[in-house]
Image: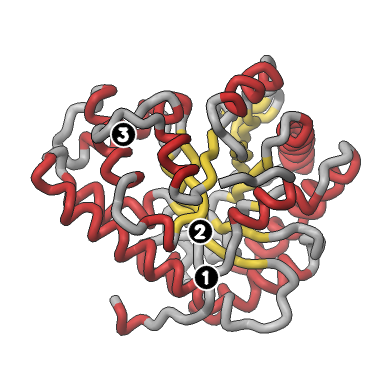
Amino acid sequence: MELKSLQDIGEAMVTPGRGILAADESTPTCAKRFESIGVESTEENRNAYRDMLLTAPGMEEYISGVIMFDETLRQSTLDGNVPFPEHLSSKGVVPGIKVDMGAKVLANSPDEKITDGLDGLRERLIEYYDMGARFAKWRAVITIGEHIPTHYCIATNAHALARYAALCQEQGIVPIVEPEILMDGTHTIEESYDLTIETLHTVFYELASQGVQLDGMVLKPNMVLSGYECETQASVEQVASMTVDCFMNTVPAAVPGIAFLSGGQSDELATAHLNAMNQIDGKPWNLTFSYGRALQAPALSAWGGSVENVPVAQEAFMKRAKFNSLASKGEFSADME
């Protein structure tokens, strides 16, 4: 798979009918997921789990790219010992790498977060490119609560996202720009809409200020949802219309695609929301998925750490991948579940 320009890579990542698998869980997060199925989180087990996902027969039909953690980028298939980036590229799937170092407490605002990882990033990107990575991911976390988020938090995270994106493009790597407004809390969908508008306006201002090529990036945002603890939960149709309206007012048409994060939604709702958005006409960009848990949860349970369970686990993964592929074209129906 020869993708020469940032635009080629960006477009390949958001091809209609295909989406991005987020398999970039850090070692501590992986340990929590493995604990839920009674499996020890060793490097060997993590390699076996990622191998189960990345070697699923036909996964390239529904998956355009895979975000990996540093450890995974350095691992190989169990059969044939092929480095994962090489294995994915041979299938026409773009290899990607998570490069941020996690969200830390924001100075002078203890209830908010800022993402670390800019120090030494250029050198890491050079290494990752040599290892086969062609896109990267950086996540900023915005929390809704009493008197937060502050504009200070939104602005500092947007500035860091743009610095990361500029460094990626300098090295021929497409940046996934991920400003995530967490949906934990009692806030209404209207509050979610207003804060997503403010956040995206700020992010695109910073991207423009720092010379980031908009046609050589992918946006990975939250959907506009009711807070998970809100008494009134918005319908699938309301989520779809408010989310699309929000992005029509903030995201330039030059951006090739938007790959939504699932953000703790159930597998089924993440698919239903994406499908409803893709039934709305007149959007200038492709809308697809960049899901982690919403693609992996059924496969993780089915796998259970056993090599005998790999075929049934791959089947569970492919089922969710297929449903979200259909949703990315507006062709999913709930009775398929």
Instruction: Determine whether, in the image, residue 103 is placed left or right of residue 211.
Output: left
Q: Quadrant of residue 312?
A: bottom left
Q: Residues within 10 Å of mark 1 (few under 14, many from 20)?
A: many
On residue 12, which mark appears? none
Q: Are marks 2 and 1 in contact (CB under 8 Å)?
A: yes
The quadrant where residue 188 appears: bottom right
| Residue at mark 3 | 77
Which amino acid, by three-letter code, is at mark 1?
A: Ser
User: Can residue 188 be seen in this snapshot?
Assistant: no
Where is 55 relative to 265, above or below? above
For the residue labelled by badge 1, is the local secondary structure a helix, a strand or a loop?
loop
Residue at mark 2 to residue at mark 1: CA–CA distance? 8 Å
Lower position in the chain sequence, tag 2 or tag 1: 2
Residue underneath mark 2: 19
Sequence-earlier tag: 1 or 3: 3
Between residue 122 and residue 32, name the one nearer to us.
122
Marking on residue 328: 1
Tell me: residue 276, above or below residue 192: below
Q: Is residue 168 left or right of residue 73?
A: right
Give the distance between the C-alpha atoms of the residues marked 2 and 3, in whole angstroms: 22 Å
